[in-house]
Image (cartoon, grey):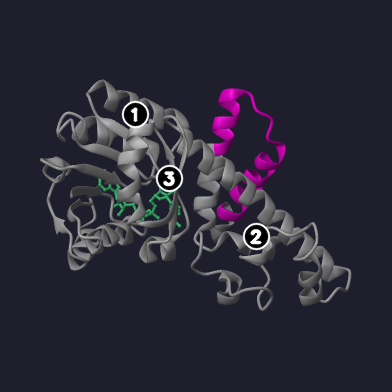
Amino acid sequence: MKIAFIGLGNMGGGMAANLVKAGHEVRAFDLSAEAASRAQGNGCSVVPTVREAVQGTDAVVSMLPNGAIVESVYTAEVIGHAPTAALLLDCSTIDVATARKVEDAARAAGHEMVDAPVSGGIAAANGGTLTFMVGGSDAGFARAEPILAAMGKAVIHAGQAGAGQAAKICNNMILGATMIATCEAFALADKLGLNLQTFYDISSKASGQSWSMTSYCPVPGVGPQSPADNDYQGGFAAALMLKDLKLAMEAAASVGAKTPMGQRAEELYADYTAAGSGGSDFSGIIKTL
Ligand code: NAD
């Protein structure tokens, strides 16, 4: 299949490479010459504009920083330039309202489009083990699934347009809040004189257990290997967690949902990144507790 790939950064670079490995012909574009040349090294053919990338293509996949960029790239350079038969897949994490707006514009121009944000970080993007949450019609999902399966371990149909983004921000709101709660509990356990490995052995088999504890323990030397064992470098940047929490708070406000824990998590991650730690892993917030 001929696939255009837009946005070859930390995530998109590995994803485009996995499409090449799966036998697709990938025509790629990124504003950054460095990202484009890495993609070229991975077997993509790099072109100088989005319009050239999408010409004559069967599908367009994008992995871009935010909703404003997704909207401008799709409305100015993809819709009306890609063949109407081309399937459009936006894998970026963006707000639900923009996802729906862009998908409406695509549909009005005769395209099938899905939002397909991911769970899993750079290692999962490189390793082809992302989880995709897909919003769109049944027909759109059926066409998207085999393309996404080449980049991930799970592809789940979340519902209609925007449902993938909704699932992603709700999931990450749980993640942000449970990470802070887990960090607080370990900090308190420490001050109460508990051995932290012993506390982990108990709580990981009791009702305090969560993914933040057993897959991503924020305490160095406790639980599985995690960014805590690498001084909170690598992993999922606190700035990206803050971005997702802001999207969740915007979505909550738009539908009048009460999310006091999500709101507090957003405030704490805003303080953490404002203090200069936005580039470190989000579990590093334990250092502030
Ligand atoms: P990144 O900044 O590394 O990559 C984004 C790329 O888009 C850059 O290479 C940039 O040059 C390019 N770009 C920006 N504007 C462009 C335009 N107009 N046309 C073409 N290219 C353009 O970001 P990332 O970490 O790869 O994240 C991408 C998306 O994935 C974001 O929406 C992010 O929230 C989401 N995400 C990231 C992670 C993660 O762990 N990094 C995990 C899950 C989801």
Q: Which residue is drawn at 27% across and 38% down?
A: 88
Q: Mark 3 points at which residue?
A: 117
Considering the numbered disc 3 on the image, is that residue within a helix, a strand or a loop? Answer: loop
Task: Check residue 212 in the rendering and tell me which mark sits there, or answer none.
Answer: 2
Instruction: Give residue 275's quadrant in the image.
Output: bottom right
Decide whether residue 252 is among the magenta residues: yes
Tell me which amino acid carries mark 2: Ser
Say which element carries label 1: helix
Tell me the residue at 54%/56% (across/down): 238
Is 228 included in the stretch rendered in magenta? no
Image spot of residue 167 (x, y percent): 53, 40
Is residue 129 or residue 237 the one in the foreground? Answer: 129
Name the residue carrying label 1. Answer: 103
User: Is the residue under label 3 in contact with that under label 2 (CB below 8 Å)?
Assistant: no
Boundaries of the magenta span: 248-273
The residue at label 3 has a CB less than 8 Å from ligand 1: yes
